[in-house]
Amino acid sequence: MDWGTELWDQYDIIEKHTQSGLELVEKYVKFAKERTEIEQNYAKQLRNLSKKYNQKRSSKDEPECRFSSYQAFLDILTEMNDYAGQRELIAENLMMNICIDLTKYLQDLKQERKTYLMDAKKAQQSLESTYKQLDSSKKRFEREWREAERAAQYAEKTDQDINATKADVEKAKQQAHMRAHVADECKNDYAAQLQKYNKEQNQFYFSDMPLIFNKLQDLDERRIQKLAQGYVLFSDTEKHVMPIIGKCLEGITKAGTNVNEKNDSMIVIEQNKSGFERPGDLEFEDYSQGINRASSDSSLGTPKVSLDPWKKKTNNFWLFSKRSKPTVTEDFAHLPPEQRRKRLQQKLDEICKELQKEVDQSEALGKMKDVYEKNPQMGDPASLASQINQTSQNIERLRGEQSKYETWLAEAGGRGDTLRYKAHSFNNNGANDVHSPDGAYSDESTPDPSQAIYAEFDDDFEDEDLAAPIGKCTAMYNFPGASEGTIAMQEGEVLAVVEEDKGDGWTRVRRNNGDEGYIPTSYVTITLNK
């Protein structure tokens, strides 16, 4: 069933219905837009809330940062921030897939509907114009036919009048004949106009208007289909992010289950344990015997112990009394014994890490200088002098600090378990200085500089087991490998990566036959194993 057949006479109804349908689309677009604004505001409020309670701290070493309950709260804030991102994604998709898309589609429908209605009006105007012509010809025919009848009656009356002359009779007959002829022409014109109108009317009601109504029906059905898709998208947009939202909620649940109250209690002990002994009983001071309090040997209590060796001794130890904030010192002597040992150990570990970094940098600069000396086209050795000198100064400074903190740690009763670092470093001339693991100079003699630069390469290859490859690389250029410790390669050759570039511009590789050596990192493209 179609509108052109069943609703051929309901133009006004069809016009009103299609207009109402377009208004429904506009209403839905407005609804989706307001929903988008709600999602955007919701996401913004969630982000602000997460930011408000997740203020950046000056240091990650804050005591509460180690508590599982505190970390769980930070994880919840992170998940809420991610959740807000998903709400923003919902708002964005609603705007793009519904608001913008439907608005554009609505404009096209309005223009199409306007065209069809204009075609209908043109057809209606054409039919009305033809009808006016028909009515005009019909009235003219009616008027002329009456005039012809009157002329015929007058001619007959004149012919019967005995007083009328022959000329009068002839004139009346001619007039009647002329009027009859005009009436016949008007009749023929009326018949032609009638035939034309009937044809146009048939075309209007059985062809033109049904076609236009069917086009409007198709337009309305497409509108309904598009609107239905918009309804589905309204749901699918949120369904699409539900898995990620679910992961955010699972993350919040996981954060809660990861809280360990026993571990948090142990952290409180670890962070705040002073290492002091509980105060002993006070001595009995017998003034009746004139016994001095300080030298009395007849105490009724246990011997008096040091209450607070890291502060001036006081006459009493009050558990809830406020203590004045001690002056911070470099050796952390202002802290209780237990906390002092931990801080000294932590500081010593930091120094050792920094020292290892400087030693590695020194080694890298030494290798680079030797390569530049043997291959001047790759760089100027003199350009590295300032960096080598600065690195050496940093190493000496750090070793001094290391020794100082090791001494303090020993005084505090620590074990001095510091991080170990490589024993090789380079002086300003690129020569290898040998040091013991604790940073002191050894008695070993310094080898020849030309031989020492790549000595570590050979030691690594001879003493260590073959390391498992961590990736592969492809040579982009030829490399002769003329220097000791390097390996030659040809453009396009594929090698196994054994050791990554440590910042010195060299990567350690291995061939299938077991040959190993260093190559310039910039000469290859590297793909590491995942």
Image (cartoon, helix red, strand yellow):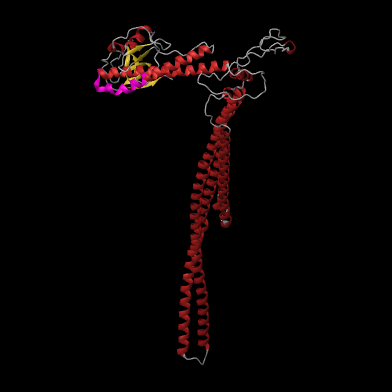
| Front residue of 232 and 425 | 425
Spot occupied by residue 6 in the image (x, y as percentages of width and height): 57, 52
Can you say whether 205 is above or below 472 in the image?
below
Q: Identify the residue shown where x is 62% and y is 22%.
A: 257
**Quarter of the view holding residue 481:** top left
Q: Quadrant of the C terminus?
A: top left
Whether residue 375 appears in magenta in the rendering, the answer is yes
Q: Identify the residue shown where x is 52% and y is 89%.
A: 161
> Along the horizontal axis of the image, is 166 left or right of 492?
right
The region drawn magenta spans: 374-392
**Quarter of the view holding residue 507:** top left
What is the tally of numbered marks visible in this picture?
0
Whether residue 50 appears in magenta in the rendering, the answer is no
| Front residue of 463 and 301 | 301
Residue extending farthest to the right is: 288
| Front residue of 178 and 274 | 274
Q: Is residue 128 in sight in this rendering? A: yes
Spot occupied by residue 420 in the image (x, y as percentages of width and height): 44, 12
Spot occupied by residue 392 in the image (x, y as percentages of width and height): 36, 18
Magenta stretch, main secondary structure class: helix
| Front residue of 462 and 157 | 462
Can you say whether 492 is above or below 215 in the image?
above
Spot occupied by residue 476 in the image (x, y as percentages of width and height): 30, 23
Q: Is residue 500 in sight in this rendering? A: no
